[in-house]
Each structure stands twice: as structure tokens, then as C-alpha cells.
Image (tube, grey):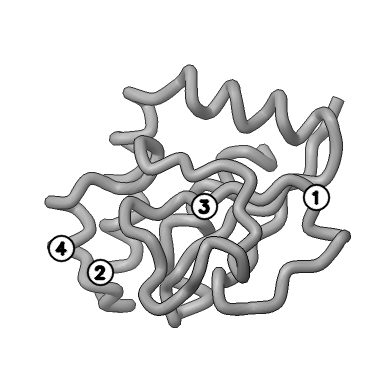
Amino acid sequence: MAIKVEIKRAYDLPSAEDGYRVLVDRLWPRGLSKDKAQIDLWMKEIAPSSELRHWFGHDPAKWHEFQKRYQAELKQHTELLSHLRQLARRGPLTLVYGAKDKEHNDAVVLREILNT
């Protein structure tokens, strides 16, 4: 059974279509209240390591290498990936992230892995 996982920036308004909302960042988005965020689960452990996050620094020039390194880190979190897949099988699942760059962030990598 194929699953479909969406991504959405934490600062965008939540909607009913989002379904179950999982924050996949290690840090809570700055200036965003928990009420406004409407996060169902904060899965810090699946976010890139602090070392990888600092190295990447959201630099698009490092994007391809970041993807490889983050995918390697995710191999250590198969139980968390499995949990996300289970949630997606139950209904809509949206991975929520705080980065400004909508194309170069950890949720993009995570969605690709979950949707394949």
C-alpha cells in the first residue's frame, strides 16, 4: 500500500488537510507558540544531528552532500521511520519544518524516503 506524506512549513497556517502533523526539527521553530503550531508529535530524534545541521547551515551548495549524510543518519532510525509510515497508513501525514528554504531542508529528504 503506497503512502503519501506531505511537508509544510511550521509558520504556514495548519489546515484539516494536513492530518497528523509531526514536527521533524531538533529545535522548536522560533517565535511559534504550541497552540498556533498545532503539532501532534514532535519527533526530535529523526531530525539531522546537531553536527550535520551546523555543517549544512541551509547552504544550497551543500544540498546533495547533506542529503547523502542525512540519509545515512536515518539508517540508524528505522524504528522512527516505521512509526511515521504507520501514521501515514492511518491517514494524511504532514511533516512540519521550520526552515525558510522550502526546497533544501530535512523534511524534503524525509518525505522522499517515506514516499518511496
User: Measured along the vertical axis of the image, is residue 21 above or below residue 81?
Assistant: below
Residue at image mark 1:
19
Look at label 2 and name its amino acid.
Lys
Callouts 3 and 2 close, C-beta under 8 Å = no
The residue positioned 53% from the left and 28% from the top of the image is 81
Other-residue count near label 2 (Cα within 10 Å), few / some / many at <14 / 14–19 / ≥20: few
The residue at which mark 2 appears reads as 62
| Residue under numbered circle 3 | 23
Residue 7 image position (x, y, % from top left):
64, 60
The span from disc 4 to disc 1 (Cα, nearest Å) is 31 Å
Q: Which quarter shows the N terminus?
A: top right
The x, y position of residue 73, in whole percent, is: 29, 35
The residue type indicated by label 1 comes to Gly
**Mark closest to the chain's N terminus, 3 or 2:** 3
Label 3 to label 1: alpha-carbon separation: 13 Å
Near-viewer residue (42 or 61): 42
Residue receiving disc 4: 54
